[in-house]
Amino acid sequence: MHEENMKKIIGILIMLAAAAGASAQEKRMAVVEFSTSYLRLKPDYESPLETQELMGTVVEIVGEQSYWMEVITPQPYRAWCTNQGLVEMTEEELKAYKDAPKVMYNELYGHIYTEPSFKSPTLCDLVGGDILRFGPQVKYSEKRAGKALKGRWTQVMLPSGKTGYVPSKELKLHEGWTSIAKGEGSAESISPEMTEKIIAEAEKLLGVPYLWGGMSAKGVDCSGLVRISHIMNGILLPRNASQQVFCGDRVEVPRHGGPETYDREGALAAVANLERGDLVYFGTPATDEKPMRITHVGIYLGNNRIIHSSHRVRINSLIPGDADYYENSHRLVAATRL
């Protein structure tokens, strides 16, 4: 009897292992179709916004409730969005999608038109960072990639296969992504020229209102501003400031006292090691009992100033006494160089 029971148990384990293997092979994958997909904590429009995902992002579907889909994003995030904003693909379809040449929308906001004319109806809207395939009318080759966007209009294709037209000057070739891990910050990963391009993208968003979970011209939070500015230049960073602080090389920020002792001299010492393009982090310093806690991030511009999203995207000084002083500068706890 003992031997028979062991055989049954082994048989059950084999079936469970086979089922797990089959399940792993049957992942439901999809591509974001909306210009900006709003991912929420729960499958409810009244639920808090967790983040935004841009058109062309590949996600895994792990749950379903009515017209809501629970997805895992590359950021990574696990949250809910509506099914009309996703295009589910088979393994073969997804491979074809990934292998296809693509363009990135390069302006803050725009549209895809049904015909190559501003007078034609719009197919959908676009925000900076959206990824699209070339339409079937475009004669693309790797050797002549630069000529694919030479005309006044370019035919593009949505993840669903719908086609339309975008002014060519609003697009740029998408050549893949660069990710920067901890300890990889150097001029080889982000050159001075790239730094200027990143800052230029952030400055395009000046005045855009703060939106928790936002990562586009429709609203942006602090880490969303940092992330989209880099995305527009082909660089992928994690979504949250508490994750971004582990990218690149740590820059020494001399310790200072609290708000009562954060005077001009102390502030100048705190920013002495920073260079243009460094990411600066604010929060609570580490203690013997608790690790450092990051609550805010911005991009250092030089001359003691940062661009960041706080109430709105704005530029502020880190030095007390300056007219544009950022009121939480005393909470500066870390900086990184990508």
Image: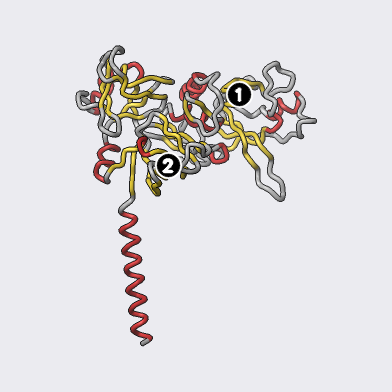
Q: Residues within 10 Å of mark 1 (few under 14, many from 20)?
A: many
How has the structure been colored for display? Answer: secondary structure
Q: Residues within 10 Å of mark 2 (few under 14, many from 20)?
A: some
State whether residue 76 appears in this view: no
In the rendered image of this protein, does residue 279 appear above or below residue 59?
Answer: above
Residue 130's image quarter?
A: top left
Q: Position of residue 121 (x, y in %)?
A: 29, 18
Q: What residue sits 36% from the left and 18% below the top?
A: 170
Instruction: Give the residue at the far bottom of this rendering.
Output: 1
Instruction: Give the residue at the far right of this rendering.
Output: 260
Q: Nearer the viewer, residue 87 or 66?
A: 66
Q: What residue sits 76% from the left and 31% below the top?
A: 259
Residue 150's image quarter?
A: top left
| Kind of element beneath mark 2 | strand
In this image, 207 relative to 53: left or right?
A: right
Q: Position of residue 273 (x, y in %)?
A: 64, 29
Q: Position of residue 6 (x, y in %)?
A: 36, 80
Q: Of the residues under marks 2 and 1, which one precedes in the sequence?
A: 2
Q: Which residue in the protein does label 1 denote?
A: 306
Residue 165's image quarter?
A: top left
Q: Nearer the viewer, residue 163 or 249?
A: 163
| Kind of element beneath mark 1 | strand
- The amino acid pointed to by label 1 is Ile
Q: What residue sits 38% from the left and 24% below the top?
A: 126
User: Marks 2/1: CA distance?
Assistant: 29 Å
- The amino acid pointed to by label 2 is Thr
Q: Which residue in the protein does label 2 denote?
A: 73
In the rendered image of this protein, does residue 117 appear above or below residue 8?
Answer: above
Task: Pick the quarter of the image with the N terminus.
Answer: bottom left
State whether residue 144 appears in this view: yes
Q: Position of residue 314 (x, y in %)?
A: 59, 21
